[in-house]
Image: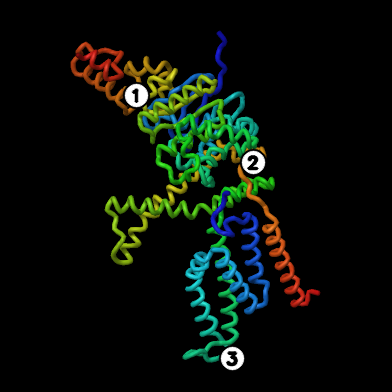
Amino acid sequence: MATPAVALHLEGVTLRYGPDDTAPALADISTRVCAGEVTWLFGALGAGCSSLLLVAAGLAPRHTGGDLAGSVTALDADPHSPAGRAALAGRIGYVTAAPAAQLSGVAATVWEEVAFAPANLGWPIERIRAAVPRALARLGVGALHHRDPATLSGGELQRVVIAAMLVLEPGVWLLDEPASALDHAGRLALYEVLREEARRGAAVVIASEDADTLLGLADRMLLLDAGTVAVDGHPRDILAGNAAWQHRAGSTATAALARLAARLLEPVPSGLRPPYPLDIESAIERWR
Amino acid sequence: MKGRPGIAGQAHPFTLFSVVAGVAALAFLLPAPTGPVLLYVTVVALAILTGAGASVARAALICLPLWVLLILLLAVGGDGARSAIGPVTVSRTGLEAALAQGARLGAVATASFVLFASFDPSRFLDAVAARGWSFHAAYLVVATLQAAPRFRQRAAAILEAQRARGLRFGGGPARRVRALLPLTAPLVLGMLSETDDRAMALETRGLDARASRTPLDPPMDRAADRVVRWSVAACVAAAALWRLHALGAF
């Protein structure tokens, strides 16, 4: 079996937003993300998940200020060099948690919004006309193509913004809380699209505390704490143990269940030991 | 067909810009006060005929305080020979100057309001892309023009949010001034933060890409548009030559 290609490689990456004596946002992080893999960045607020995505996209520290040490390679190019950025144009799908700030601000319709990036990249108009409806349909927002983006609801806007990246079929996805405005069904639909993207060969990196949904999606979890990778492994293995909850990551039902299990264990050893139950069914089974 | 309703809305975006630039140039090149006054009358008539009467009214409302100020300062308070108009006497040269300045202001403001009411950002960007001009520069122009409505929307949202949290805007001037801080601080900080996020998003969406932008639905540049643009250019050139001649340049 062939080894999957490395799509993203960070080597000794340290990022500081302030002077040298301030705590780094990322501290000596080295990791590789392979094509076809869904990687989940998990951590408490300030752990460094968003910073890691910004560095991987080549956006920090250029847009955020600060100093960066170490090297980043995405799809065999350096996103921090002008030549690398030119080579990577349209090949990295970066999505932030604030969809309204990602709108072009000049599109009159959702169709134009999604066509903005392909047009900037000089795609032939026939290719754009074929790709835009496909991307909208995959996110379930095809019916909104004629709407003014400024009139969309939060959930609609979030899907349109992701469709605006999906249309490019990027080789690396970097998503920061991409489902924050979606309901449960919307989250499942989005994550299915991202799973399809991974099957297509894209590397998908998602920063999220949505443990309930990502537990079944991610192939790998990087648990970040204070800018370092505290644990690297399969999500189920990490979450069912103590590590994730000791780092205070996560706020969903999965997190609550595991914390409850850990707390029950604390006062009097009651026989509860990791692996902790991660869903209601296994909790009932365990504690009946 | 894309574009805003009305003749101005359906015109090629470059035609609208050239008309506004032409009006601004003519307002200062034509002999005062007759030239600017006739120009203002012409602009108002054309705007009404092309269905942009609302823009005429809006521009007049904006100009009204300045017109009053010009008349008070230059005509009523001016020096030189005076004439009686009703119960007041005004300086003749001051009145001419007030008329000239007021008409210039009115003409440029009316043309600009018609442009803003008829302006379709995506049509303009498509027109720029179709010409192969710098899309990045055009985007900056459009984003600047679009900033005002976004700022207004955000201000309204913050105002509602602060009211919901108990902030009161009534009362005396001091209380109103104090209430401004919880309004302006989140407004300015939010806009700055959004600017950073937008810059990053636009970069990932290829705004700085080296490729030539593909026009999605470029507006038609009809013969009538070209005639208007060339006519405006000819009028400005003729007015400039006349002005230079009057100054004794040749």
Judged by depth in the image, the label closer to the viewer, 3 or 1, is 1
Q: Which residue lies under the disc numbered 1?
A: A212
The residue sitting at 29% across, 25% down in the picture is: A253
Judged by depth in the image, the label closer to the viewer, 1 or 2, is 2
Residue B26 percent coordinates (x, y): 66, 69
Residue A19 percent coordinates (x, y): 48, 37
The residue sitting at 50% across, 52% down in the picture is: B147
Q: Which residue lies under the disc numbered 3?
A: B81
**Placement of B81 over or under A122, stated as above or below:** below
Q: Would residue B217 be seen by someone viewing this image from the given angle?
A: yes
Looking at numbered disc 3 in the image, what kind of residue is underneath it? Ala
Q: Which residue lies under the disc numbered 2?
A: B213
SS at mark 3? Answer: loop
Q: Would residue A68 be seen by someone viewing this image from the given angle?
A: no
Q: Residues within 10 Å of mark 2 (few under 14, many from 20)?
A: many
Residue A163 percent coordinates (x, y): 50, 33
Q: CA distance from mark 1 to mark 2?
A: 42 Å
Horizontal placement of B42 versus A160: left or right?
right
Looking at numbered disc 1 in the image, what kind of residue is underneath it? Asp
Q: CA distance from mark 3 to mark 2?
A: 61 Å
Horizontal placement of B87 versus A3: left or right?
left
Q: Nearer the viewer, residue A166 or B54?
A: B54
Dot 2 falls on which chain? B
Q: Residues within 10 Å of mark 3 (few under 14, many from 20)?
A: few
Residue A172: image quadrant is top right
The residue sitting at 43% across, 25% down in the picture is: A191
SS at mark 2? Answer: loop
Q: Which mark is residue B93?
A: none
Q: Nearer the viewer, residue B147 or B108?
A: B108
Residue B156: image quadrant is bottom left
**Placement of B79 over or under B135, stated as above or below:** below
Q: Quadrant of the C terminus of chain B?
A: bottom right
